[in-house]
Image (cartoon, grey):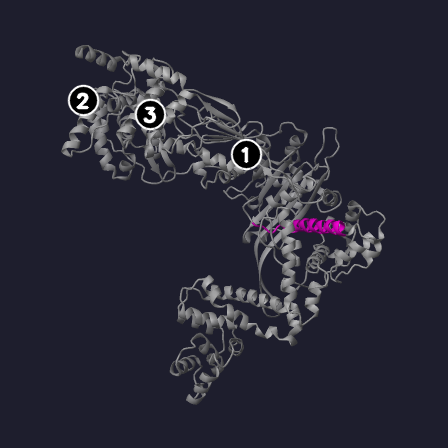
Amino acid sequence: MLVVAGVLVAQEMRTSAHQARFFADLARKATFTLGTGPSPSIHFPQSAPYDDRLGYAQLPEFLQKLKARDFEITQQARISPTMALIVDDGYFAPYAEKTQAGLRVLDRRSQPLFQQCSPQRVFERFDEIAPVLVDSLLFIENRELLSPDQPQRNPAVEWDRLANAVLVKAENSLSGGARTPGGSTLATQIEKYRHSSEGRTSTIQDKLRQMVSASLRAYQQGEDTSAVRRQIVLAYMNTMPLSAKAGFGEVHGLGDGLWVWYGQDFREVNRLLKTVTEPEGTISEQAQLFKQALSLLISQRRPSYYFDADEAELDQLTNSHLRLLGSAGIVSPALRDAALQAPLGRRAHKVPAEAVSFVTQKAANAVRTHLTGLLGGSRLYDLDRLDLGVASTLDAPVQAAVTQLLRDLREPASAKAAGLAAKQLLDRGDPAKVVYSFTLYERGADANLLRVQTDNFDQPLNINEGTKLDLGSTAKLRTLVTYLDIVDKLHQRLALLEPKELRALSVDRQDVLTRWAADYLAASPDKSLAKMLDAALERPYSANHAEGFMTGGGLHHFDNFKPEDNGRTMSVRDGLRNSVNLVFIRLMRDIVHHYMFLTPGSSAKLLQDADDPRRADYLARFADHEGQVFMRRFLVKYQGKSGVQAEDELLGSLRPTATRLAAIYRTIAPEASLEQFSAFVTEHLPDGLDPTEPRLAKLYAQFAPTQMSLADRGYLANVHPLELWLVGYLRQHPGASQTQVMQASVAERQAVYAWLFSTHRKQAQDKRILGLLEGEGFLEIHRQWAQMGYPFDTLVPSYATALGASADRPAALAEMMGILVNGGLRKPNTRITSLQFATATPYETRLQYKAGKAEQVLAPEVAQAALGAIRRVVEEGTAMRVKNAFLRPDGSSYPVGGKTGTGDQRFDTFGAGGKLLESRVVNRSATFVFNIDERFFGTIIAYVPGAQAAGYDFTSALPVQLLKVLAPQLTPLLVGGDAAAPAAPSVAACGGKG
């Protein structure tokens, strides 16, 4: 019986006949299908190198995050009970795994925008691999794998090597011997480095799991494994892990390994190794290439060790394998000997980055960056390696056409041909240095769909979303919308009152908007909101520039762009049409005052009654705020300096007198002795002015902190008292943080402004209280602007915010325009319609974007009134260039509306009396926020950064002209056809199984 059993076992070890039937039958039942909706049976894998890199292990976390961002699972894999049982028992799911995978982004017509395949360089078929590489690999790792005599052979087990490994392992466990030779086949090694924790075999259970999983995978196609075994070689060559290198990241497969570690083109290497020259020829080049490839095959078991170690160690190991291969006849003696003499020549420096045009990838990068945020990641490197397909809303042909045109405009000839070489355009300045950014959305049923997003800035920065820019008079549109929204709120509050009640309404005299609304409704027979908004747009304002405005903490004067507007009075509608600054400064003043004096009697009483207890609260807030502002300035000046350096800085701009020096030293060194005080004063006084000892003693006593307030010491020293206090504090607490300084100076900040609390200082108090009330008014304005998509946390509390002083982003302006064209609804903007994870795997999950409920942030009548006003900007005002630029097939024009803005950002330095000492140009921008047919909307911006902007004088006429030039590229979108433009480059999907 033992003999019979032994014969049967030997036969099974040779033929694998029973294993073939068992595993083939099991694998046939281990299936998966794609079903509608979330799957009740899906089993995601545990963390492992392959499953982490492709995102399979993180899918539960990804899906949870996407669900919170309005994505719904539409289809998901269902696994069979047999596959579920296999996975539940701890084995790896048997399916045809991918050699290559990576992020793929498609446009709205399923045209490719972006494709990342990892690994990047692979053999497509087994027959492509140079035979000498296959023979060498099998000799080292799995000699019997491709033996043709047993078609049912289980490639997961090579019994003689396994038995030898087990015996040596047992012997070493008893003797404490060295490393055990590996008994793994290529199939089990693939399972190990893909699916075992950290790509390692830690226990006997791990090894068994790898062998069973490899066996199941091998018999998926049936009992004959002949073809599968060649696929195993192919998969191993393409995916073996080869450590990581700076400039590239993780390295997988022979193709990427040859490029990353040796700088070799693997296609050329493979071609040369397929035709190794005979002895009489020269084989030096082939020999070095073969040695480099062989070193990669050898290093796979400990890649990080060998590639971090000195090259000589890997060279020595490779040479030993060369001798073995030569002795076994795998390579010719000539190839062996030449390879032994060849150096490895490992790449010493980081892998050079491939030349990538950021301009051509701007749209794809916008999708990738957005997707990184959706999935909760931080690195595009990780995102690009996920097995993920993305359907975007972008239109690739139009995107390519617009991108090409913007790039061409950097050439003077192209700019001239586009009509840009004219006054207020590019008659001055180098066209090559102008950055253009363009964004276009289409209004959808539930969301706004991004169709084009591009610029000609060949850097990763997204000008549209990643900048804070002075966009000039586009802020007038925000101001107008706030104004019309206030009119709507007043209409809601007052429209039902009788005329007698409206006339008797108590309104603060500075709240002119409420007074106007009450008077209008009392007199008008038509009390509809639409009629009232139209009347509000006709309210007149002076454009006179002679008036000074107390705002932003001081007296400011403003100018109009056109001097001829200075003496005019015009309606709000006409002020917007012609972008008249003083109309909107005065309108902003009325808006601020409306919020300041909204509650009848409250703020007015505070300013009129010197005994109102709330005044003290406001003044205390002012003192604290002002004190913090000064303290931050002084911290910049003194933080990080030693005590001596701080003293020198403090005294450097003063004319020293005994009184000033006494006030300074008794503040910065209050504990100093009379001797130390005397030495300080004497040292810093000019020669011949040494005071007597009695005089010094008197000064020492007179300026003691207990005898004189900090404010008085600062006044006599001619130094801000908080600056004095800070220098003294930093002497005692070097290295103190801003937070610590602010906490320690609470009392001093109040004490310095103690004079302000005196009731006979009412005028000074009113000035400061008004400043705080103005700030509170801007808080209300910011709340409304934020509802309209304004991207920043605060506004500059100045009327100049109506002219762009608070800055903006092109993307945020586009969002506001989207609210208007959607009738006051704030719909989400989207650039992704669907996601497809892990296609053709047991983890496949497809999601669709389902926009959440839109928020009504403006009354539809307000949106329509604003749209009507900005149509006049195009029909009669500052954007007339683009009138009739977009034509329907029947020759009629699509209506266009928008608002222009020019930003000339400068850093101004003023001297005494407000004299301008220096005006340094920071950047220049010109913007047009627009809509076409109240269906498409977006922004176009021209921007020159840095001091070079001083060489340009373009205005918002430049982006308007540019939109006109882009009309032929954009019109196909409007009519629903294909763009008459070069298509985006074709990108093939990643392929390969193994």
Position above or below: 547 against 393:
below
Residue that numbered label 1 is attached to: 71
Mark 3–mark 1 distance (CA, rounded to whole Å): 37 Å
For residue 309, side relative to residue 441 (left or right): left
Q: Quadrant of the N terminus?
A: top left
Q: Are marks 3 and 2 in contact (CB under 8 Å)?
A: no
Q: Which numbered disc, 3 or 1, marks the residue that appears first in the sequence?
A: 1
Q: Nearer the viewer, mark 3 or mark 2?
A: 3
- Can residue 915 be seen in the rendering of this structure? no
Q: Which numbered disc, 1 or 2, marks the residue that appears first in the sequence?
A: 1
What x and y, as percent, mark residue 692?
A: 43, 89
Q: Are marks 1 and 2 in contact (CB under 8 Å)?
A: no
Position above or below: 655 against 987:
below
Which residue is nearer to you in this view: 279 or 262?
A: 262
Residue that numbered label 2 is attached to: 327
In magenta, the rendered stretch is 468-493
For residue 80, side relative to residue 241 (left or right): right
- Can residue 547 be seen in the rendering of this structure? yes
Q: Would you say the magenta stretch is mainly helix, strand or loop?
A: helix
Which residue is nearer to you in this view: 100 or 967?
A: 100
Q: Amino acid at mark 1?
A: Phe
Q: Nearer the viewer, mark 3 or mark 1?
A: 1
Q: Nearer the viewer, mark 1 or mark 2?
A: 1
Where disc 1 sits, the SS reads strand
Q: Residue at x 81, y 56 (%)?
A: 502
Instruction: Based on the picture, tell me whether residue 254 belongs to the magenta stretch.
Output: no
Residue 214 lies in quadrant: top left
For residue 299, side relative to residue 799 (left or right): left
Residue that numbered label 3 is attached to: 236
